[in-house]
Amino acid sequence: MHFRFSLKMFRKHFLTGVVGFALLIGPASLAGATTEAPESTPESIPEALSDVQTTLTGTYLSARLAQDEQDLELAAHFYAQALEKDPENLLLLERNFALMLATGRHDEAFSLADKMAAMSNHPAAKKAKDATDAQEEEVSAETSELNARIAPMIHLALGVKALKGRNYSSASIQFQNGVKIMQDNPVQLIARSPLRRNLNDPRLLSASAQYGPFALISQTVLEAWASIGQDRGNLPKALEMLKADEESEVNQFFFSLHAGLVASYAKDYTKATSLLQQSLDADPNSLATATALVNNLLKAGNEKRASQVIEEFAASAADVEEKQWLMTTFSAMKPIASTIRTPQDGAAEYFSTLGNALTEEGAIEGGALYLQFADYLRPNNDMTSFSLARLLERVEKNELALARYDTIKTGSPVYRKAQRRGAFVLARLDRPDEAIDRLKTLLEGDFSDLETVSVLSRIYQSERRFQESIDILTHGLDSIKVKRDIHWSLYFLRGSAYDQLKDWDKTEQDMLSALKLFPNQPTVLNYLGYSWVDRGINLDKAIEMIRQAVALRPFDGFFVDSLGWAHYRLEQYEEAVNFLERAVELRPEDPTITDHLGDAYWRAGRKNEATFQWQRVKTMQPDEDLLKSVDDKIANGLAD
């Protein structure tokens, strides 16, 4: 089972844990790296680079760039090259370890962890010993900062390796040491103004997972699992470690959750239910927290409360399929086999949960590290596989993502999600017929599965099979007994398909139906408002609708473009220029928005600027009709 929690809560904890500290964007400078960097960074796959001559600085900078682009495989390749040139560099060892693990090369990663442990004090100590008195203080500070960053990862890796081998005593010592280092040497993550950066920077989240606030939570939870692995009689000691900080919802969620799971593993079901209830209170939408709580209530003989939890979860904001899975699983009101049967399972559950959250926040390296730790401790778990597949999608490894989705078993709570995501991947791989067949099989003629109906309709539209999209959406809408606000998107999708078939009356009807269900839906407000403006009808109402959409999403370049174009159609050219300039700032790569700005400049009397914008459109791979239009405008301008 897999425990997810609110991303809003996740961000809140991270920010409260790091505000006021100095940002560590990347590793410290490499000793001896004095060769100039190459002018360009290689972009081909590692195999194509095997014969290219390299320098330490060049490979290091290439690795950093690959990391920034979230290409972990390429970054691992370049860091490995750099390590060959400087094999005693502890920082390069740490980078190689992290990226080997993040790319699923477990054995190589743990071999590097052993090497880091063997030499972690040696290079720094030698450097400090050889320094002059004038240098000694500076070297000592550098060494302390470097060790504070690398040592927690060494202890985490060696602890996980010991945990995998059921050497619980050794694992416990490693996690204790990791916690102590982080408590004694808190690493600074965020800079003071004016160097302060975006507090939600994915790099900061990844750093937090490796040696910051989330790493501290991680090693505390893992130490508790190692302790209970030594002896189930250690339950009081493990629970003492997991006392939650009441001011932090994230601590409350994780510590109460794993305290409950630890108590359940020790067969203290009464204590487990109390702790799991605290965790569910912190995040009422977590399927697996609810599952663990219901299971423990049934084991404790409290069927009445178990039934109440199922009903409460059915009223939560959780996924519809997750609610159905919980009701079906406990329909007989009998306990099921626990998914946390060993301390390794408990630790893997933690890594999988936080790894998934990091991935969803865009912290690819941190997410990959934690998900690979989970896969190492508990291979072939459906929830971890689903999260890894989502990560692979994010870094455009679509074939690998599809292979992961296809390992997920039919009885899993995420089976249907995996099939839908797999269909999206197939469509991206230019295999739309396979995607459509997969989704039709999933539907089996049951059009009440509205999520699958929605995905299938989108793929039909991407293939310009608009009538088939309309047909499947109509079946889906007809299956709904009572339409609610969440169903607006089905009308919107069908309306947009009608629009492509030039059936304006039905387009308008569906857009109005969507707004009747969800009056302030910004996407529908913008679409219908823009359509009215483009047709020169209902202009006053249209511009008010677009203004409302922009107020709801002020940083959406398409919405701002619609507002600018509305002013253009009303011949308010200066207003149009103001909004269209803003839209181009938000969407500088969009040819249609750039074309609109060119038109507005021309009407405002700024003809040279108009021609420049039309010339820009030609560099953006516009469709054939737009290209022909801008060529004509460049040659002849706009007619009066």
Image (cartoon, grey):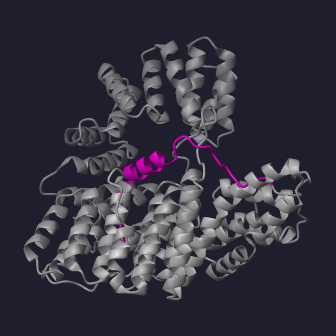
Please identify the residue farthest to the front as the structure is shown. Answer: 133
The mark total stands at: 0
* Residue 129 visible in the displayed image: yes
> Is residue 25 part of the magenta span, yes or no?
yes
Q: Nearer the viewer, residue 426 or 80?
A: 80
Position of 98 with respect to 389 (left or right) is right
Position of 384 with respect to 496 (left or right) is right
Q: Nearer the viewer, residue 149 or 640?
A: 149
Please tell me which residue is depicted at 18% across the width and 58% down the height of the picture: 478
Location of residue 42 in the rendering, given as x and y in whole percent from the top left corner: 80, 59
Q: Which quarter of the image is occupied by the C terminus?
A: top right
Position of 290 with respect to 232 (left or right) is left
Q: Which quarter of the image is occupied by the N terminus?
A: bottom left
Please tell me which residue is depicted at 56% across the width and 60% down the height of the picture: 182
Vertical order, 384 against 191 (above or below): below
Quarter-of-image position of residue 429: bottom right
Location of residue 631 in the rendering, given as x and y in whole percent from the top left corner: 66, 31
- Specify start and end residues of the magenta stretch as a single range: 1-29
Quarter-of-image position of residue 542: top left
Location of residue 110 in the rendering, given as x and y in whole percent from the top left corner: 64, 79
Please identify the residue farthest to the left as the structure is shown. Answer: 304
Vertical order, 21 against 220 (above or below): above
Please tell me which residue is depicted at 33% across the width and 59% down the height of the picture: 252
Quarter-of-image position of residue 502: top left
> Is residue 147 part of the magenta span, yes or no?
no
Vertical order, 190 against 271 (above or below): above
